[in-house]
Image: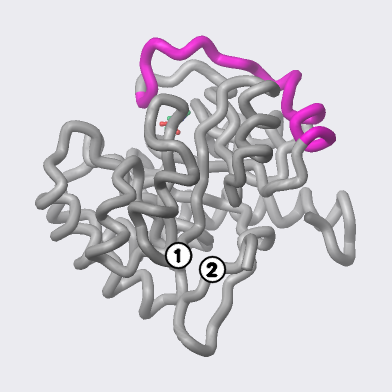
Amino acid sequence: MAGLIEMTSDTLLNLSECRLYGIIDLGYVEKSDATCIAEAMIKGGVDLIQLRGKERSIEELVELAAELHELTARLFTPLIMNDHAEIARRVPVEGVHVGQDDDSIEVVRRKAGRAVVVGKSTHSLEQARAAQREGADYIGFGPIFATPTKPGYRPIGLKGIKQAHLDVTLPIFCIGGIKIDNLEQVTAADARRVAIVSGLLKAPDIVEYARGCRKLLTLKSEIRNPKSEI
Ligand code: TZP
C-alpha cells in the first residue's frame, strides 16, 4: 500500500497528490492552540499535518496527538508524528517522520506495529537516494534555505532539487526557510511539494497564507503537466 494513507475504511488518500505539508512545531505555538491551527491549515488547503515537539515528553505528545487526530481524521487529513514511532501504537496517526539520527525505517514500522506512512528527513542527494533504498514513503529534502527552526544545518540551496526528482521517485517535500514570498523560486527550481513550519505558524492569517501557498503549488503543477503529474 505504498503511498496510500488509510484514513477510514472507505477513504484512501494518495500521498503523491499531497503538495503542501504543514508542520505544527511546539517551539512556535502553544499546545492549547494546536487544534485551531490545524483546522486553519486544513481550511487553507494543507494536505498533510505533522506534529513536532522536540523536548516534549511522550505523554504530552500522546495527549496532544490524540486530540489533534480527532480533528484531522474528521477532515480527512493525515496526521504524521515527528520522531516517536511508539506514539503510533497509542494514537491512530497516519504516519511517522524520522530524521537521519533517529530510528531506521524498519524499526519505525516495527515500533508502530501497524501500517503507517514513514517519512525521512534528508539533507543531501545521497541521503535522499538512501532513504528511498531504505523504504521511506516520502522524504523531506532540505533545509533549502537557512532557518532558525532547524539551527546548525547548512542550507543545501535550490540546485539539488531538480536532480533529487530525477534520482528519487518518492514524493519529495522541500523544506527549510520556505515562505510564500520565496515559494515561486522553489517551484521554479523544480520542487513539486513543500513543507512549511514558521511561515505558516507565524502568519497573521494561517488560512490565507496556506491558501496562497496552495494556489502557487497547484498552478505550477498544472503548468508542468495539465493531466497527471507526480
Ligand atoms: N527539516 C529541515 S529544515 C526544517 C526541518 C524540520 C525546519 C523548517 O522550518 P521552517 O520554519 O519552515 O524554515
Q: Position of residue 93 (x, y in %)?
A: 35, 64
Is residue 165 on the magenta stretch?
yes
Pick whichever, 222 or 98, lies toward us: 98
Scheme of image coloration? one colour
**36 vs 154: above or below:** below
List x then y, in percent, for residue 179: 52, 34
Q: Of the residues shown, which amino acid type is indicated by label 2?
A: Ile
Neighbor class of circle 1 (other Cα within 10 Å; few <14, some 14-19, many 20+) is many
Rendered image: mark on residue 78: 1
Is 75 a magenta residue? Answer: no
Residue 50, placed above or below residue 35: above
The quadrant in which the N terminus is found is bottom right
Q: Residue at x 60, y 51 (%)?
A: 137
Q: Nearer the viewer, residue 15 or 216?
A: 15
User: Which quadrant does the C terminus fall into?
Assistant: bottom right
Give the magenta-colored segment's residue range: 149-167
Ligand 1 position by quadrant? top left
Work out whether residue 227 can be spotted.
yes
Q: Position of residue 143 (x, y in %)?
A: 53, 23
For badge 1, the amino acid type reads Pro
Q: Which residue corresponds to mark 2? A: 5
Query: Marks 1 and 2: CB-CB under 8 Å?
Result: yes
Q: Is residue 201 left or right of residue 185?
A: left
